[in-house]
């Protein structure tokens, strides 16, 4: 496998996955949850996600010279929020999906009540995780604020995506950008900023990382829209061609496939540009950016 292989992430990301999964699992087990809730939480978290967000936190921490063991604690919090967002995104009242990461969604595997409550719990555990982490109090406070803001924005994006009511003063392309920056971009940006915050003394590096995160965050959802349009269920691990069926506002529906690809290319270049101040320490983020632009699942 090469670093430009489109179906699998770069090898250095694949190499991070076992330690990320160990940290996720041991954290979940440390919360002393009742058996049924623990089982549902493990089912929804330990089920083969790509771990893009925790990997970004670790790689961004590495790029700014922050301690990686600390970064893992922040990475876990972001992945908890992401998994919560997926559980609720799949519920009948939202996207009504039956397949996630190649397996039945949590509400299909258990029931709706458990899926709602396991989601609620993961949202809470993310902040508990930060509160119990090894960061100093000031960093904990900055991270909690950052994660709360990103989660609020994700929910705002999900409201726009599910219920519409977008500002009518915006053009269609401005509307879809607003949805995507919120529902997906915000948490990916937060994952990156968390890595930057692991070395809070270097404020300009955090700025560069935040700009990188903003561009790849929007790009991630445009690529997801194209995967929904062109991917097959077995490869992607979730139902495809759902967006048009459900009348979702997507980049391909708003501007067409070719223009969506042009915008992905532009965002990829902007993300690359954002990393310039970081020099060679950001090389892994550069390779990851290339893969994120062309991934097929
Ligand atoms: C899926 O995210 C939801 C979106 C924001 C598009 P991922 O594609 O990162 O899902 P997993 O975690 O790998 O399953
Ligand atoms: C997901 O967007 C955004 C979230 C906050 C979960 P999608 O609804 O497009 O994600 P998938 O395609 O179901 O993974
Ligand atoms: Mg959705
Ligand atoms: Mg969905
Ligand atoms: Mg999608």
Image (spheres, rainbow, N blue to C red):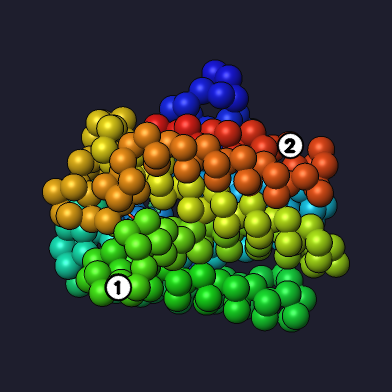
User: How many marks on residues?
Assistant: 2
Give neighbour class at mark 1: few <14, some 14-19, many 20+ (Cα, 10 Å): few
- Residue at x-position 33% and y-position 37%: 257
- Cβ of mark 1 under 8 Å from ligand 3: the answer is no
Q: Is residue 115 left or right of residue 191?
A: left
Q: Position of residue 90 (x, y in %)?
A: 24, 58
Q: Which residue is mark 1?
A: 168
In terms of image quadrants, where is residue 166? bottom left
Q: Position of residue 97 (x, y in %)?
A: 20, 53
Q: Residue furthest right?
A: 201
- Residue at x-position 18% and y-position 47%: 244
Q: Is residue 273 left or right of residue 101?
A: right
Label annotation for residue 275 = none
Q: Is residue 220 visible?
A: yes
Q: Is residue 151 above or below residue 11?
A: below
Point out the image quarter for the N terminus.
top right
Label annotation for residue 283 = 2
Q: Secondary structure at mark 2?
A: helix
Point out the tag, 2 or 1, that comes first from the N-terminus.
1
- Residue at x-position 47% and y-position 43%: 263
- Residue at x-position 77% and y-position 45%: 276
Point out the image quarter for the C terminus.
top left
Q: Secondary structure at mark 1?
A: loop
Q: Is residue 44 above or below residue 115?
A: above
Q: Is residue 187 left or right of residue 235?
A: right
Q: Is residue 98 visible?
A: no
For this rendering, which residue is in front, 109 or 251?
Answer: 251
State the CA–CA distance, disc 2 to disc 1. Answer: 41 Å
């Amino acid at each position: 496998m090469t670093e430009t292989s489109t179906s699998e992430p770069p090898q250095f990301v694949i190499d991070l996955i076992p330690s990320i999964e160990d940290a996720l699992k041991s954290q979940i087990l440390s919360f002393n949850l009742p058996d049924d809730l623990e089982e549902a939480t493990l089912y929804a978290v330990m089920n083969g996600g790509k771990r893009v967000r925790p990997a970004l936190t670790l790689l961004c921490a590495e790029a700014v010279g922050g301690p990686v063991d600390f970064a893992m604690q922040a990475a876990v919090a972001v992945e908890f929020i992401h998994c919560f967002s997926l559980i609720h995104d799949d519920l009948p009242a939202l996207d009504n999906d039956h397949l996630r990461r190649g397996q039945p969604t949590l509400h299909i595997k258990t029931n709706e009540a458990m899926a709602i409550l396991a989601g609620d719990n993961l949202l809470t555990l993310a902040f508990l995780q930060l509160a119990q982490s090894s960061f100093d109090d000031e960093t904990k406070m900055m991270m909690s604020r950052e994660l709360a803001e990103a989660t609020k924005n994700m929910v705002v994006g999900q409201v726009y995506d599910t219920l519409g009511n977008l500002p009518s003063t915006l053009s269609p392309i401005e509307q879809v950008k607003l949805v995507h920056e919120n529902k997906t971009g915000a948490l990916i940006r937060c994952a990156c900023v968390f890595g930057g915050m692991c070395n809070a003394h270097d404020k300009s590096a955090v700025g560069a990382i935040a700009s990188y995160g903003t561009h790849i965050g929007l790009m991630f959802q445009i690529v997801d829209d194209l995967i929904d349009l062109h991917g097959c269920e077995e490869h992607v691990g979730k139902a495809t061609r759902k967006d048009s069926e459900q009348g979702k506002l997507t980049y391909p529906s708003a501007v067409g496939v070719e223009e969506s690809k042009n915008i992905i290319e532009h965002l990829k270049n902007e993300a690359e540009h954002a990393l310039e101040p970081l020099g060679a320490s950001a090389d892994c983020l550069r390779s990851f950016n290339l893969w994120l632009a062309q991934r097929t699942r």
